[in-house]
Image (cartoon, rainbow, N blue to C red):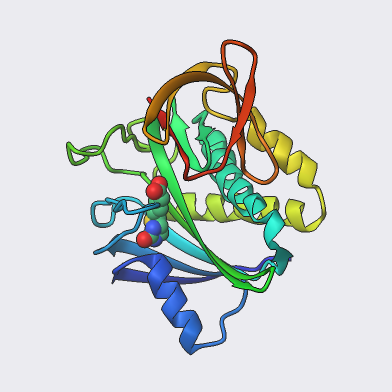
Amino acid sequence: MLHFTLYPVSAVDSTNNYLRELKEQHELSEGTVILSDFQSMGKGRGRNAWYSGKGLNILMSVLLYPKIPATKLFYLTEIASLAITDMLKVIGIAAEIKWPNDIYVQDKKIAGILIENVFSSDIIESSIIGIGLNVNETEFPSDLPNPVSVKSAGGKENNRNNLVKKLLEAFKSRYEQFLGGQLSALHIDYNALLYRKNKQCNFVFRGRNFQSTILLVKENGEIILQNADGEQRKYAFGELEMLL
Ligand code: BTN
């Protein structure tokens, strides 16, 4: 059973960093959640930053001790992605998952996930699942490619506390689905919500642009594409960029 302990704060550099530092100083239980109104150095994946206006959105990090082999790492991505899409569904927003873990409403990004793990040999000892969900932001900086928020997507609820509660409920039920061994159900649900599945998309691989169709994502997180000749190829996250 997963129990959450919430620590709301007004400002941190990054909720992921703050939770990691707190964990280094104290013994924290699984389900510790840092929620912040603002991040001065919000992190996205790679070298990206994560933008969020003060007090407008959900910025949170959840601590897990999964103790699972590294081969099962991608399930953490599936749990977090589906928790967000489940919650959005409850408030009337049909969202999809852009591989590997961006949450999209139509062609716009509503949420991002940054997972940072600590391994002990082959085992994932701890995992910090950082979630940034745009809730009440309506004016984004012009250099952000395609953002959208719960409010601008017409969500039925935009009270942040209520949404955090719903999001954590969804997270708990997806994590417990995983702990209960229902891995294929999780994986089927993830693939069912895959953004642009069975559609031809533009990609960049090692500096070369090409078109291919998204077939599915494997349990290890690799995506399988099929080109016009019917040839299938798999790619790991980080080596392939999808162009919108
Ligand atoms: C991405 O889409 O590139 C991932 C964005 C993740 C942003 C969240 S906001 C809460 C947590 N703290 C961070 O510094 N990043 C994650």
Q: Is residue 12 above or below residue 138?
A: below
Who's the residue at 44% across and 21% down the image? Answer: 210
Measured as percent of width and height from the top left, residue 157 is found at 44, 40
Q: Residue 183 vs residue 42: left or right?
A: right
Q: Can residue 134 be seen from the camera position used here?
A: yes
How many callouts does the rendering have?
0
Residue in the picture at 45% in, 81% down: 22
Q: Toward which corner of the image does residue 187 lie, by quadrant?
A: top right
**Residue 158, how many percent across, how many down?**
39, 43
- The quadrant of the rendering that contains the C terminus is top left
Q: Is residue 36 above or below residue 219?
A: below
Q: Please tell me in which quarter of the rendered image ligand 1 is found.
A: bottom left
Taking the image as drawn, is residue 154 in sight? no
Nearer the observer, 139 or 184: 184
Could you tell me which quadrant the N terminus lies in? bottom right
Residue 239 horizontal/vertical position (percent):
47, 41
Residue at (47, 45) in percent of width and height: 238
Foreground: 16 or 59? 16
Residue furthest to the left in view is: 142
- Rendering quarter of residue 87: top right
Spot occupied by residue 14 in the image (x, y as percentages of width and height): 34, 66
Q: Residue furthest top?
A: 229
